[in-house]
Amino acid sequence: MNPVRRAIEVRGVVQGVGFRPFVARLAAERGLVGEVGNDEVSVFIEVEGSAPLVDDFLSALKAQTPPMAVVFDIAVSERAPRGGNGFRIVPSRRRPGARTLVPPDVATCADCLSELGDPTDRRHRHPFITCTNCGPRFTIITDLPYDRPATTMASFPMCGSCAREYDDPADRRHHAQPISCHDCGPRLWWELAGGAGEPLLGDTDTLATAQRFLSDERIVAVKGIGGFHLACDATSTVAVQQLRERKRRPQKPFAVMARDLDAVRRIAFVPPSAELTLTQPAAPIVLLPIREDGPLAPGIAPGLDEVGVMLPYTPLHHLLLAAVPGRDAPAPTLLVMTSGNLSDEPLCFTNDDARARLSSIADGFLMHDRPIAVPCEDSVVTLGSNGEVPVRRSRGFAPMPVALPSDGPTTLGVGAEIKNTFCVARDELAFCSAHVGDMGSLESQAAFARSVDQLTRLRAASPEVVVADLHPGYATRRWAEDYVERNPETRLVTAQHHHAHLASLLADHGLVGTPVVGVAFDGTGYGCDRQIWGGEVLAIGVDVAECTRMGHLVPLRMPGGDAAVRNPFRIALGLLHGAGLGAVPWAPDEMEEAEVQTVRSQLDAGLGCLDTTSVGRLFDGVASLLGVRHRVTYEAQAAIELEVLARTAARPAELPFPVTSEEVPQLDWRPLVTALVAARDSGTDRAELALGFHRALGAATAALALGIARRANVDRVGLTGGVFANRVLTAEVTGRLRAGGLEVLTHRRVPCNDGGLSLGQVVIGRAMAAREQLLTDRRANGAVPLTAPGREEVD
Ligand code: ZN
Ligand code: ZN
Ligand code: FE
C-alpha cells in the first residue's frame, strides 16, 4: 500500500500540557514516521504511513487529548510522502506576530502524588514534583513559546537524570518544562520575620519548623504557586483572631485549606457535585454550607453560613499538611490560607516584597527560590442549581480565553475599580486576566500596570482599542486615558458599567449579536445620566454597542455618598425618608443619637446626598432596617448577611413591591419599606421579613423584565451584576421568568460581579470599532452614514 503523508495543525491550549509527547506516543504506537513541534499558535504535526493507520492516528488525536489541553480546531492537509525513520519531537519555531495560548496552573496529579509518598521513588517528598499533566504554568512563564528557557525554571539546570526523562518520549515527564528533582530543583527554607537569625535549610527541618509554628497558634507566610498565603491553624480561635488583627481584616471570611475530602466533610456539607468541583485540576476555593458542629474557629466566617474550602494543590501544600517522618510536630489538618497581603493591598509574590510587607503579620516564612513570574490569587466558585458558578476567576482558569463570535482589532478592556480584572481580545479570543483586586491604592495601580504589560507582551498584542468604564473617577479610566495619550494610534472607548455587565454575560454564553433584555443589579456604576446606577433593566439588540435603559429602581437617597456605603444605617434613614416615614423614631442600638440626627437633617435639607438606583444599596438599607447590620467592614457584607438570615426563614412574609407604569417603568420600593417597618414593629419574625423582601423584589423584577421582553419581542433575559451572587434572589427571578416562558441567562465562565466586567468591555469596544469600519466603508462607497460613531446609546 502506498504511504500517505499529512500535515496537521492543532490550535488551542496545546502548549505546556503534554501535547507533543502525546502525539509522539500515538505515532509510535502505530509505527508512523514524521515529526511534531510547537510554534506560537499551534502544535504542528507531519505524519506518514499507510492510509488506514494515519486515519486511525487522526481519530485518536481527536478523541484522547491530554487532560489539560483544550483544542479549538484541527486542520489537515495532504503532503507528498518522503519516508524517514521514526517520529521526532522537533524544536519550537517562531512565527512573527503569532498568538499562542498559555495554559493555566494545575494541581498536583495523582501520579505525582503517589511518587511524592513513595520512599523508593527518587522524588520522594520533593516539594516541586511535577509532570506533563500538572504543576505551575501561567505563573512561571516569562515568554513564548513555552519552553524551559522561557520560564522561571531557566535558572535551574537539569541534572543528568532529569534531562534523560525530559528527552525520553516514553517518559511521563517528556518535555515537562518545570521538571526537577532533589538534586537540581528549587530549594525550600525557613526564615523568621524581620530577618532574625540564619535561614534554616533542609526540607525536613523547614517543614517541621513550619508545622511547629502553626501548632503553636502562630502565623506562617507560605510561598505558593501564584503568590504568598498567610496560614494559621483554622481551628484556633487565638490564631485566627491574631491574623485578623495583624492583617487588618476584621470580618471578611477566610478561606480554609483542608488536608483531604474527609477533612472537608468535618467542617462543611459536601454534596457529591462539590467533590468534583474541589478535586478538579484548577483546585478552586469552593463555598460550602458550614457545619455548626465542626472544629473551625468561629472567627473564620463570622455571620455567614458558608465557608470557602480548597484542597492542597501544590506538592509543598501536601507536605505541609502531612506528618514529617521522624519528627513529632503535629501535622495541621485545617489551615486558614488567605492572600499574603495587608487588606486592600496587592498580593505579595516575590521573596523581597513578602519580607518587606508581611513581616508585621507573619511570624515565619516558608520560602523557596522558584520565582513567580505572574501573581495569581486563588479562584472562588460556588455551586448553583446548574453547577459551578464563578465568584473569582483566577488561578487554574486564567488566562484561558473565552471565544468571541468574530475577529476584530486587538482590544484591551481595563475593568472596574473593585475586583479588577482586565481582558485582552486578540483575533477571536478574549483573554481575561487573573484577579488584580481593588484599585484604591497606588500599589494596586502599579500591580495593574505591570500585569497589563505582562499579558500584552505574552500575547504580543498591542491594543488598538482601549475600553474603560464611563466613571471619570476610576483609576483604570485614568490609566486608559494616559495610555491612549502615550500611544496616539490607540483609540479610547468608554462603556457604561451595566451595559458592560450585560455584554459580558452575552460573551459568557457565546451569544454576542443576539438580542437580550438584561437585568443588571449591583452596588455602584456610573450611569449615562451621571447618577449612580445599579438597578437597571437594559435592552441590547443585534448591535452590542447599543444599549437602552428600559426600566430601573426608583432612586433612593444616599446621605453622605461613600459614607453611606460603609454605613448601611444611613441608607436605612434614606429609605425611611423616601417612604415618607422620616419622622418615625428609629435609632439602632449601637448608633450615636447625634450621628442619626446629622443624617436626618442632611436628608431633610437634601445636602450631601446622592441619588442612586442601586439594588445593592437597597439591600444594605433593608439589612439595617431589620437590625442585621448597620456598618460594614467589607463590600456587600450587609447584603450577604441579609441573605443568610433569609435562608433561615420558615416562610416568607408577604410584602408589596409594585412596578410603576411610566414610559420607563420603575421598581417602587417605597410601599415595601412602609410595610416592612410596620411588620417589624408589630413583631413579625425578622427572618420571614428578610425572605419576604427577597421574594417581593424577585417577583417585581421578573414582572418588570417580562413586560419589557414582551414589548421588545425578545425571549431571552440575562441576569448580571454583583447582586446576582445572591442565590435566593436569583432563584426567585429565574423561576418566575421561566414560568413566563423566557430563557434565562446567568454567568457560567466569568463572574457576575465586577470581576467579569472587562470581558464585556472588550465586546463593546470591538462593536464600536466595527461601526466605525462600517462608517468608513460607507463613506468610501459614497453612502450617508446612518449612525453617528462613538455615541453612547444608553438612555
Ligand atoms: Zn503530575
Ligand atoms: Zn534533577
Ligand atoms: Fe458592577
Image (cartoon, helix red, strand yellow):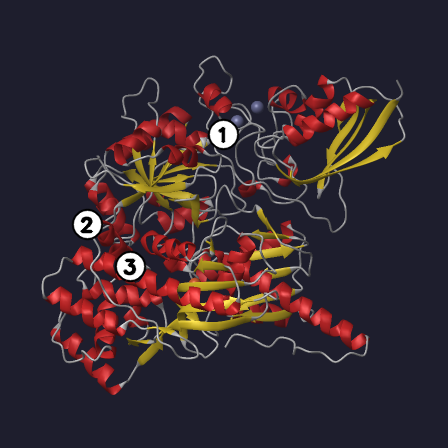
What residue is pinned by disc 2?
650
Cβ–Cβ under 8 Å for marks 1 and 3: no
> Between tags 2 and 1, which lies in front?
2
Badge 2 crowding class, 10 Å Cα cut-off, few under 14, some 14 to 19, many 20 or more, is few
**Of callouts 2 and 3, which one flags the residue occurring earlier in the amino acid sequence?**
2
Q: What residue type is labelled 3?
A: His
Residue 592 place in picture, x, y as percent: 13, 71
- Residue with the most extreme bottom position: 605
Residue 567, quarter of the rendered image: bottom left
Q: Which of 407 and 219 is in front in this view?
A: 407
- Residue at point 40%, 54% (across, down): 739
Give the structural element (helix, strand or loop) at label 2.
loop
Q: Is mark 1 within 8 Å of ligand 2?
A: no
Give the structural element (helix, strand or loop) at label 1.
loop
- Residue at point 49%, 29% (across, down): 128
Q: In which quarter of the image is ligand 2?
A: top right
Residue 552 place in picture, x, y as percent: 40, 72
Give the structural element (helix, strand or loop) at label 3.
helix
Q: Which of 724 and 5 is in front in this view?
A: 724
Whether residue 8 is situated above or below residue 769 in the rendered picture: above
Q: Is residue 163 left or right of residue 503?
A: right
Residue 88 place in picture, x, y as percent: 76, 25
Measure the alpha-carbon separation of dots 2 and 1.
51 Å
What residue is pinned by disc 1?
128
What residue is pinned by disc 3?
694
**Residue 400 circle label:** none
